[in-house]
Image: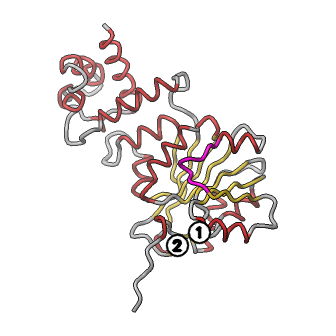
Amino acid sequence: MSRPRKPKLGQHFLTDTRYRRRIAEAIPLSTDDLVVEIGPGRGALTKLLAERARRVVAVELDPALAEQLERSVRDDPRIEVLQADILSTDLEEICGRNRVEKCFVFGNLPYYITSPILRHLFDFRAAIRAMALVVEREVAERITASPGSRAYGYLSVLTQLYSQPRTLITIPAGAFSPPPKVQSALVSFDMTPRFPDWSRQESERFLDFAKGCFASKRKTLVNNLSRTYPREQIEQGLAEDTRARPRSSPSRLRAEQLALEELAALFRRLAVGARE
């Protein structure tokens, strides 16, 4: 009995035709869209995307898969296959040579590299109109989590700072080959930032701050931030947030209890205190 082949580069190919169609129909595409597809693999969705958009640039890391896909779409002028690593791909350059200001990003992301890909895409957010990504269901829950839930953490803050994410479809493991050990989900991202007046530098400083807030989920905010700020200053900064929580003490608050706006307000208070 032969052993199941390990997915190359962490890929699980979408083979269920019903879910291919469901995903393609759920993606909020326009006929004017330039779609950048991440990891098209064997092209299960590439042609369906091309039917609904103006053009598709399919970015595939695996040379053999890229060559195979190139052969299968050679006669379709709507599809370009780019053999490249998405983490080193310049989306602004792709938009520029296709004469559009922004693109739509779609991808069935390898689970092991989802977070780095998300960070890379958000670096190019000015060139992205919207996104729809297939990710591990647990990751989808973290991306869309609300404050106070177990799933809420740094990834929630990162994605919700730069976009408005929403889960569209849950996809069973059996829709893929080889089947992953978990379910997947299609998540849409409306690229509307939470704080549109923030500069890139301020957003990056806030994310560094948020990473410190969630450094250890078992620890309180005071303990997580005490290496950077005086404890008294942190507690004073948190006092504003505890007014809405009469039973909460500033010293007991954890990062997952604070909404994005509350974390941003704390970030500003501590930044002002550090300058004084």
Between residue 17 and residue 105, name the one nearer to us.
105
Q: Is the residue 106 above or below the residue 231 in the image?
A: below
Gap in angstroms between the C-alphas marked 1 and 2: 7 Å
Q: Amino acid at mark 2?
A: Ala
* Image point (46%, 65%), residue name: 10
Residue 175, disc: 2
Q: Amino acid at mark 1?
A: Tyr
Between residue 17 and residue 276, name the one nearer to us.
276
* Image point (34%, 17%), residue name: 269
Residue 115, disc: none
Q: Quadrant of residue 237?
A: top left
Residue 79 percent across, percent down from the top left: 75, 59
Horizontally, is 107 left or right of 253 in the view? right
Contact flag, marks 1 and 2 (Cβ < 8 Å): yes
Is residue 86 magenta-colored? yes
Q: Magenta residues?
A: 84-91
Between residue 12 and residue 20, name the one nearer to us.
12
Image quadrant where one finds the N terminus: bottom left
Horizontally, is 127 left or right of 9 in the view? right
* Image point (43%, 81%), residue name: 4
Q: Which residue is mark 1?
A: 19
